[in-house]
Each structure stands twice: as structure tokens, then as C-alpha cells.
Image: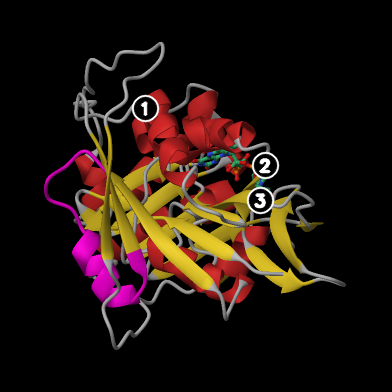
Amino acid sequence: MTYKTIILAAETDQEINSVTFELVDLARKLAPDNEAEIVYPTHLNHDCTEQLAETTGLTVSRLKIQGSGEYDPQTYKQAMQSYLDQKGFSFLLAANTTRNRDYIPALAHKFGSTCISQVSDVKQGEQDNCLLRPIFAGKYEAVLEPEKETAFLLIQPGSFQAEPPLSRNAGEVVEYTYTGKPESIRSLGMEKDLEESEDLKNAQVVVSAGRGISEQENLDLIKKTASMFPRGSMACSRPICDMGWLDYKYQVGETGNTVSPEVYMACGISGSMQHISGMSGSQLIVAINKDPGASIFNYSDICIQEEVVNFLQTFLDVYAENSQQGQTQDPS
Ligand SMILES: Cc1cc2nc3c(=O)[nH]c(=O)nc-3n(C[C@H](O)[C@H](O)[C@H](O)COP(=O)(O)OP(=O)(O)OC[C@H]3O[C@@H](n4cnc5c(N)ncnc54)[C@H](O)[C@@H]3O)c2cc1C
């Protein structure tokens, strides 16, 4: 079987997002001897195409999308379709991000292909490669083998090797321009949420609440713990926002913020892949959970099996006691 793998590059603030290198790593695992190339859709004049070709040694197609200058799912789907129409490919690899989930399944449908989201690993099956994705909050893994000739795979960030490959020769850069108009949506631009929490993004210590915190009033303990640190911030898992206990600007994870503080304290959080993808870049992960089998412990440097409210209350009491005796230092 011959493979041609197309990698959809990801960027953040005009810089290559490291998940792009994870996709390159997966492309090599899926088809070590076969051809792979990268596509980089952009509205911008400045982009990272040349840099990508240099670091990976792969051909990079700059897919220039003319139009309003903003992302809209229909234009991106049409632009990618017109680019892919000229290619033979077996796999399209993209990051499992909100944007890609917005239009890649529809794109896969146009090609009569399979789309598998949240892919976290690959292994050799009886005949061909099998793809793994977590299910039941990460306690099991579904093992899947695509049966169609082409498959669109959305990869869970943090699952593969993110080191840029060492390449001796820079790859070629190829230009494609898409000038079509969206069929039924006109984008009027994007407005930034002014309340986006810069404190959380820049925090050194993040204290994050999950459903295990049990009561809304217990969030005070999270807030107090975070405020012990000079650059501390509170955060939470999605159910806490869904219940209306905290604003969505505090949510960490795939559909929330991505944070990489020096310390991340996960308080009563189970460790779903959707949460892990937003905090796995933290330098030190401390998890407090009463369940010894909680998935979060697989990602943590310090695992504390405790009732979270008691633990935080004791932690704060001991700190207050030491402060009164003049024994406290900066807790970080
Ligand atoms: C498309 C999609 C996108 C998503 N995006 C996100 C996202 O961005 N961020 C996110 O967080 N989630 C996201 N989710 C939801 C995600 O799948 C999980 O449901 C969620 O992360 C679980 O949150 P949790 O760990 O707080 O709750 P739970 O999974 O309910 O876990 C609670 C944990 O608390 C522990 N616990 C209970 N009581 C105590 C106690 N008294 N003391 C100590 N420990 C206790 C339990 O053992 C358990 O491990 C998304 C889901 C989907 C489908």
C-alpha cells in the first residue's frame, strides 16, 4: 500500500504551533518510507512556510486564501477542498482543535472519507496501522482501523513527539492561491473577548478546580490557594463553567485556555484528554483526587490521594499558622 500523508500545519500568533511537529512525527509512524507534505492555509503575507520547509525538510504548500482576512469555516473548507482535489492522499493529519473540528468533518464528507477525532496513538494492527483514541474519560482506548481509502485524522495535542525533526535539506515551498467566495456565509471579522484572562495565561502557579470540588462555595478555597502565590491564578475544568460556577475565561483544556505554568494544581479533576491537552505543558503537575485510579495521576509529578476540600483547608490552615509564627516563605 502506498501512502501520501498531508499535514495541516497549525499556528498560534503567527508562530508554528508545536503540534505541527507532532503531526510530522505521526506521519513518519504511519508511513516511514512514504511521501508526506505540509499545507499551510493563511490569509497573511507573513507566515511560517519557509521556516517549516527548513525545519522539516518536507514540501510545504502555502495555501493563500484571499478574502476578508479572517477565518470562516466555509472558505477554509472550500480552499482545502480545491487544494486536496489536486492531490492523491491516504491520510490528512490535523490537530484536534476547535477550528479544525469546525470544518474538517465536513471536508472529509466531501471526499467520502472517514474522519476520526481525538487520535492519541498509533499501533500496528493485524494488517495495517490502528489508531487509538481515549474513551470513558481516558479509562479505555478505542482501537480503530479506517476502512476507506482516505482518512482525516484529528490528533490530540500532546500525544506525539513535538521536537522539530532534524533535516539536512530544506523542503520546497509551493504556492497555491484560493480566490473563491464562501457559498452562504459572509465573515464580518472577529471580535476579541476583552475579558480574556491574561492573568491565567501568564500565571506561574495555576490552581484549578474540577467537579470534585463538589460545592460552588468551595471555590473560595481554590481562590485563596491561588492568591498565596505572587503570580497565582485560579482556573477550572469545563463542568465548573457549564454549571455556571465560573466564567468560561477560566476554563483550561481543548475548548478553553492552554496554560503552561511552573506549577499546575489539579483539584478534583479526573484527567480527561480534553482537559490534559490544555495543561500538559506545565512544568510540575500536582493532582489531588480521592480516586487512586484517576487518569490525572498518570500525568502528574505529585499525586495526592485525598479528599480535596479537607486537603486545601489543611494546606491553608498550616500556611496561616506558619505565617503567624513568621515562618512562611513564598510558597512557590
Ligand atoms: C468536544 C469536547 C470538548 C471539551 N473541552 C473541555 C475542556 O476544554 N476542558 C475540560 O476541562 N473539559 C472539556 N471537556 C469535558 C471533558 O470531557 C470532561 O468531561 C471534563 O474535563 C471533566 O471535568 P472534571 O475532571 O472536573 O470532572 P469529572 O470527570 O467528573 O471528575 C471529577 C473528579 O473529581 C474526583 N473527586 C470527586 N470528589 C472528590 C473529592 N471530594 N475529593 C477529591 N477528588 C474528588 C473524582 O474522583 C473525579 O476524578 C470537553 C468535552 C468535549 C466532548
Q: Tell me the amino acid under the disc marked 1.
A: Thr
- Helix, strand, or loop for circle 3? loop
Residues at badges 3 and 1 in contact (C-beta under 8 Å)? Answer: no
Question: Could you say where residue 293 lies in the image, as x and y percent from the top left?
Answer: 74, 62
Label 2: which residue?
113
Q: Tell me the amino acid under the disc marked 3.
A: Thr
Residues at badges 2 and 3 in contact (C-beta under 8 Å)? Answer: yes
The number of numbered discs placed on residues in the rendered structure image is 3
Question: Could you tell me how far apart the alpha carbons at marks 3 and 1 are, in whole angstroms?
Answer: 22 Å
Q: Residue at x 22, y 20 (%)?
A: 189
Decide if residue 1 is on the left or right side of residue 238: right
Mark carried by residue 75 = 1
Query: Which quarter of the frame holds ligand 1?
Result: top right
Mark carried by residue 332 = none
Quadrant occupied by the N terminus: bottom right
Question: Could you tell me how far apart the alpha carbons at marks 2 and 1 are, in whole angstroms?
Answer: 20 Å
Q: Which residues are magenta?
A: 42-59
Label 3: which residue?
150
